[in-house]
Image: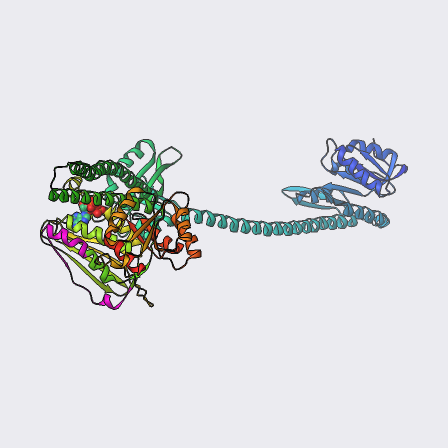
Amino acid sequence: MKNGLKQPGKKIDILIVEDSLTQAMQLKYLLEKNMYSVITADNGQNALEVLDQFEPSIIISDICMPGIDGYDLCRRVKALDREKEIPVILLTSLSNPEDVVEGLECGADNFITKPYAENYLLSHIQQIIANQSLRQTERVRIGVEIIFAGKRRFIAANQQQMLTLLISTYEAAVLKNTELLQTQEELQTLNEQLEEMVEERTVELKRNEQKYLDLYDNAPTMFMSVEYQTGIVIDCNETLLKKTGFKRSEVIGNHFYSRYHPNSIEQVKKNFQLFNETGEIEDSELELITVSGEKVPVLMNSTAVRDENGNILHSRSVLQDITKLKQTEQELLLAKDKAEESDNLKSAFLANMSHEIRTPMNGILGFSQLLSDRDISDQEKDKYIEAIDKSTQQLLHIITDILDISKIEAKQETTQLTIFNLNELLEEVIAFFRPMFNQKKLTLSYVKNQTFDKYKIKSDQVKLRQILTNIIGNAHKFTEKGKVELDVFIIENKIIFNVIDTGIGIDPSLYSVIFDRFRQVELTYSRKYGGTGLGLSLSKSYIEMMGGSISVDSIPGEGSTFIFDIPLIIDADPVLDNRSETEEIPIVNSWVDKTLLVAEDEELNLFYVKTVLKPSGIKIIIAQNGLEAVEHCKTNNEISMVLMDIKMPEMDGLTATRIIKSFNKSLPIIAITAYALSGDGMRCLEAGCDDYLAKPIKRELLYSMINKYIS
Ligand code: ADP
């Protein structure tokens, strides 16, 4: 198309020249939305063709386009000989100052920077349209030649054009600046947010670090890291320091060998060798050393920490304290040894028991057979009877011990407290042993402690007698020459008993075991000295039951001292148990007119009682069981006293006693109990019996008991 004066074509508001279809459509849509009529051309050439037919109020053109670019188009538009000059707005990024010079040069009216703000664009279009009339009058062109960026340029724009272009440039710069400021502000806010986030993350990281450090330091296991090349400890946790008592500075920086007890060093060296080869150590039992030189047994596991080339940097060891495990192991070993020892003891005990029981049994059998020989003299007969009596006592003693120990095992044994005169008891025990000591030509000394005549004490008399009998019996048994001394005194609230002998003595290593059941120092002793190994165990149990303790002191070959104590309880309201086993047989003339009911089902026992009481002339009637006894007491007023066996068929003695006492309270009833079951006495008294006698019944005791109640 040729330039020349043109007739005004069809009126249109805006011509958009834009080679990007998307951008052209976007702009068209915006302008049409704001009530402008719009036509588009996709390059400069097409725009010029459009101008042949149309008369737009404004041209908005992109700069970079193929063929005729924005500047060129502007130049040509400005050169058109039109009645009204068409303002041209160039869309530019304004990244280069040359754009401004080129804009001036080509006579552009305005710059709009890309990307444009919609409102800004619309307000400019309005402004340009409003200024159009002004443009018509002001057409003075300035021809200026300038050199910019090394190029000679000719600016032929009019003043209005120049002004609006410069203002638009300035505005664009201001806009850019505002945008920049806004972006800067946004950046600032983002930066602050980022800083806040970083701070929060740092706090969280620190918290986590603290948490893991706490876990590491206070874990139940010990941790230690050792530098591989030097063997220097580079780290350890608090647990290790607490367990060993060392300061951190004493551990870190020192060789790891110094953490171990000398006992373990050999093993530690072997482990190190293994670690060199495999990079790990599994379940190695070692001993750490504490600051005071004590051992802490540990189970150690180590792994290697390597660099990226696989070279070992340092070891990381976990050490678990196994003190308790070791203790348990030790206890188990001891228990095992003890179980094995008990097994051996049991066999030894059985062999010994067999011997102990057979000896008196043989005695009884042998002498009984001899007794049946009609030709023996009275003297021999007495000797045999004495031998049988001795064997029987021995057997009874063994059986009693076994029964007592069973009762203790079954926890059925309890103490039975009575009030008695201790001196009397001690004198009885001494009197019992005197003949045995005389026979062995040993001295048995006891200096009476006058204090005990002033006080009556409360204790288990039966058990105390048994304890003294066992200990003095042992002293007698294990002493060949010299003496045995009984010494009794009070310290604070305890009665102390010392039994000192000049016998074979006991090795100190055996002090505790001799109090174990079936335990004898040497099995050969059982052959030489006899005994079941139960006496001391029984005595210890009884003493402890009474609230006391027993111990032994000895010099082997010179003698032993057994010391025991029981609590001193003084009776406030004395009721003396004044039965005495040593009383003389009383004068019995007065019993001729008395009747004694003997309730007893065993023939042998009956025979014994009848024989023993025959000299007294007392009349004896017999009941075979409890029922018969009750019947006799109901019907026979002559009965002055009852001897009641507690174990009988049909009705037992205690039931019978209760019934008899219910209708005849004043009739004296003496219970006959089994000697071994010492708790029976108490039960008899509770049932209403006036007193009790233990089997086998001693002649003197029977007489004194009848005498006490019958007269
Ligand atoms: P037993 O005397 O029946 O063997 P004990 O339990 O009374 O059983 O005593 C256990 C062991 O203690 C005895 O076998 C003996 O080895 C030792 N023993 C006890 N008393 C004495 C003592 N006075 N002197 C030396 N050894 C004693």
The x, y position of residue 142, in whole percent, is 76, 48
Q: Residue at x 27, y 59 (%)?
A: 590
Asked which quadrant contains residue 297, the reply is top left
Q: Is residue 620 above or below residue 302?
A: below
Q: Is residue 184 above or below residue 449?
A: above
Asked which quadrant contains residue 607, the reply is top left
Residue 294 visible from this viewpoint: no
Q: Nearer the viewer, residue 494 or 653?
A: 653
Q: Which residues are magenta?
A: 430-456
Q: Nearer the viewer, residue 585 or 75?
A: 585
Query: Which residue appears farthest toward the front when viewing the image?
Result: 593
- Residue 260 counted in the magenta span: no
The x, y position of residue 525, in whole percent, is 16, 42
Q: Nearer the viewer, residue 245 or 457?
A: 457
The x, y position of residue 204, in whole percent, is 52, 49
Q: Quadrant of the C terminus?
A: bottom left
